Amino acid sequence: MRLSPYRYLTRLLRGGLESFLEHNDPMFPHLRCGCHETIKLGVDNPDNRYESARINPEYDYRITGSRGSVDYLGFSAIINKYASGGSMETTGFLDSGDIQIEDDGSFEIIVSQKEQEGNWLRMSPDTNAINVRQTFQDRINETAAKLKIERIGSESHRPEPLTAEKLEQGLNGAVRFLQGAANMFENWSESFLPTLNTLPPADQEYCQFIGGDPNIYYFHSAWQLEDDEVLVIEAPEIPQCQTWNFQLDNWWMESLDYRHHNIHVNKHTAHYEPDGSVRLVISHTDPGAPNWIETAGHNIGTMCWRWIAADHHPELKTRVLKLTELKETCL
């Protein structure tokens, strides 16, 4: 779709302004949801709620909250350089399996460079942000975790008024973020062209370099289909895992519009074959097959499969068929 890149830039700009201007004070951090239905970035997972906060390693922080029933909850301390080079190194990580949680579901995490008793998220001297991933299998019936972050010792203080210098810094940061993120993900999409319409394992080291979750093993590639073609993806084996999911994205690595189209599937929502395998069908029109993934008006884009906390990472099979062939051979 020719208009998608222009809308993508407006989304990056909105996200940059929120991050660098409105929520850029590490003295008074706020866990904000900066990636959602209308701000999308870097293969944003439709099953996720993303939250982030700006911090400064010179201070210590406290995260408090209630666990809820969301399937997966992970906290990363990171060095976010999306505005100046495209990396997002993880310096400390906790998931809900590592966290001591009270009987009422409440918990507390201390974020600091110095090791703490109890739930401790490690910062390095260069850590500048916290990322939180909440991954749902069933959004209707699972309850999100409710979280709050505060700088320890900030109770009796208030933020300083906005200054011309802070405004200029925020605007410049938003522009650098837009440029850095757009270039990074465009280059990544280009790198998938040699594996078009296949879905091989990604470079896991690079995925972690740009902010991937340490518990996730990623498969990434690009897809392209003519109007009468379908892409069949088969997972002959589903390993023991926390969950898994697949999603379809546009060329800019934004998830397609999951509010109005069925563009992803996960461990809970998938239809399984009698032998326990899974087959997905990506096509422009409804083929009458289970696990139909809609292209939502796009003919080219990227795609991602995630094994999350899996005991091993089986590879995937893909093939492109004509729609008529699909109906003859698979239905």
Image: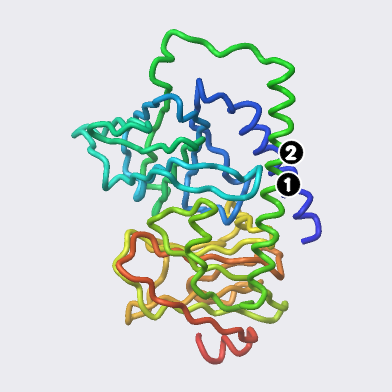
Q: Is residue 199 left or right of residue 115?
A: right
Which residue lies at the image location 39% right of the left edge and 25% below the top edge? 60
- Quadrant of residue 165 within the rendered picture: top right
Q: Is label 1 in a helix, a strand or a loop? A: helix
Name which residue type carries label 2: Val
- Quadrant of residue 156 within the rendered picture: top left
The reply to whether the C-beta atoms of the residues labelled 1 and 2 are less than 8 Å apart is yes
Which residue lies at the image location 18% right of the left edge and 34% below the top edge? 103
Q: Is residue 11 left or right of residue 239?
A: right
Report the front residue among 17 and 184.
Answer: 184
The colour style of the image is rainbow
Give the residue pinned by disc 1: 179
Q: Residue 281 — which label? A: none
Which residue lies at the image location 69% right of the left edge and 48% below the top edge? 180
Report the front residue among 329 and 29.
Answer: 29
Residue 81 position within the rendered picture, expressed as x and y whole percent measured from the top left: 59, 44
Q: Where, quadrant-wise, is the N terminus in this rendering?
A: bottom right
Which residue lies at the image location 73% right of the left edge and 33% below the top edge? 172
Residue 203 position within the rendered picture, expressed as x and y whole percent measured from the top left: 51, 67
Q: Is label 2 in a helix, a strand or a loop? A: helix
Name which residue type carries label 1: Gln
Report the front residue among 153 and 95.
Answer: 153
In the image, residue 149 sits, relative to residue 213, either above or below, namely: above
**Mark 1 → mark 2, Cα distance in angstroms:** 6 Å
Residue 200 position within the rendered picture, expressed as x and y whole percent measured from the top left: 52, 75
Seen as rendered, the residue at the extreme left is 103
In the image, residue 7 sits, relative to residue 293, either above or below, namely: above
Residue 319 position within the rendered picture, expressed as x and y whole percent measured from the top left: 56, 84
Label 2: few (<14), some or many (≥20) within 10 Å?
Answer: some
Q: Residue 175 — which label? A: 2
